[in-house]
Image (cartoon, helix red, strand yellow):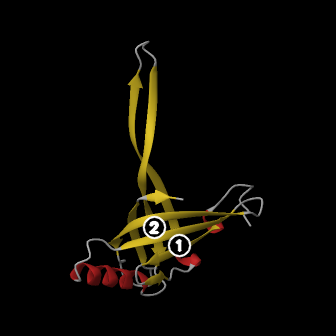
């Protein structure tokens, strides 16, 4: 349950990433940051009386995921995406489910559909430092 003074924190969420080849195993303790931002087409119409009516159309969105490496899951994702490309598939889509425990104890689930994941950094291996990995993604719909 959230303990940050009644506000949500990063430890209140769990991420489940389902790829075309099965689940991507990301332990919740490995997730350091998860960020998602909707995209919009913006516009406005003005009627004959000069009144302006702005509008926004949601067109999916994008996000980032920062991890502390705990196993070879991210590397396997890259291998699977590469194999799909070589097999002639145009895209390797996933679904990301974000499960949030709210302050009142209830659960909220956000499902990001038609997710195209890009692995930005497999990690830097240096001495005794934790290997940090980063991914970015675009999604077609949030339900």
Residue pictured at 43% horizontal, 43% vertical: 57
Query: What label sits on residue 69 in the rendered view?
Result: none
| Local crowd size for mark 1, using a 10 Å CA cut-off: few (<14), some (14–19), many (≥20) | many
x and y percentages locating residue 71 in the rendered image: 46, 87
Mark 1 lies on residue: 31
Q: Residues within 10 Å of mark 2 (few under 14, many from 20)?
A: some
The residue identified by callout 2 is 65
Determine if residue 100 is in view. Answer: yes
Q: Earlier in the sequence, mark 1 or mark 2?
A: 1
Who's the residue at 57% across and 67% down the image?
98
Identify the element where label 1 is drawn.
strand
Q: Nearer the viewer, residue 16 or 49?
A: 49
In the rendered view, does 112 fall on the left or right side of 41?
Answer: right
* Quarter where residue 132 is shown: bottom left
In the rendering, at what x and y percent does residue 136 appear? 38, 65
Q: Give the image quarter of residue 88.
A: bottom left
Q: Nearer the viewer, residue 69 or 50?
A: 50
Comparing 112 with 137, the one in front is 112
For residue 49, which quarter of the picture?
Answer: top left
Residue in the image at 40% along x and 79% along y: 20
């Amino acid at each position: 349950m959230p303990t940050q003074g009644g506000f949500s924190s990063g430890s209140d969420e769990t991420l489940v990433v389902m790829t075309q080849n099965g689940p991507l195993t990301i332990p919740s303790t490995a997730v350091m940051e998860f960020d998602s931002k909707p995209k919009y087409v913006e516009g406005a119409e003005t009627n004959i009386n000069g009144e302006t009516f702005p509008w926004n159309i949601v067109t999916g969105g994008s996000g980032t995921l920062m991890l502390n490496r705990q196993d070879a899951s991210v590397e396997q994702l890259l291998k699977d995406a590469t194999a799909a490309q070589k097999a002639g598939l145009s895209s390797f889509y996933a679904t990301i489910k974000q499960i949030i425990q709210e302050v009142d104890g209830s659960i909220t689930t956000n499902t990001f559909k038609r997710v195209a994941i890009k692995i930005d950094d497999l990690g830097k291996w240096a001495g005794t430092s934790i290997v940090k990995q980063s991914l970015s993604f675009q999604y077609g719909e949030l339900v």
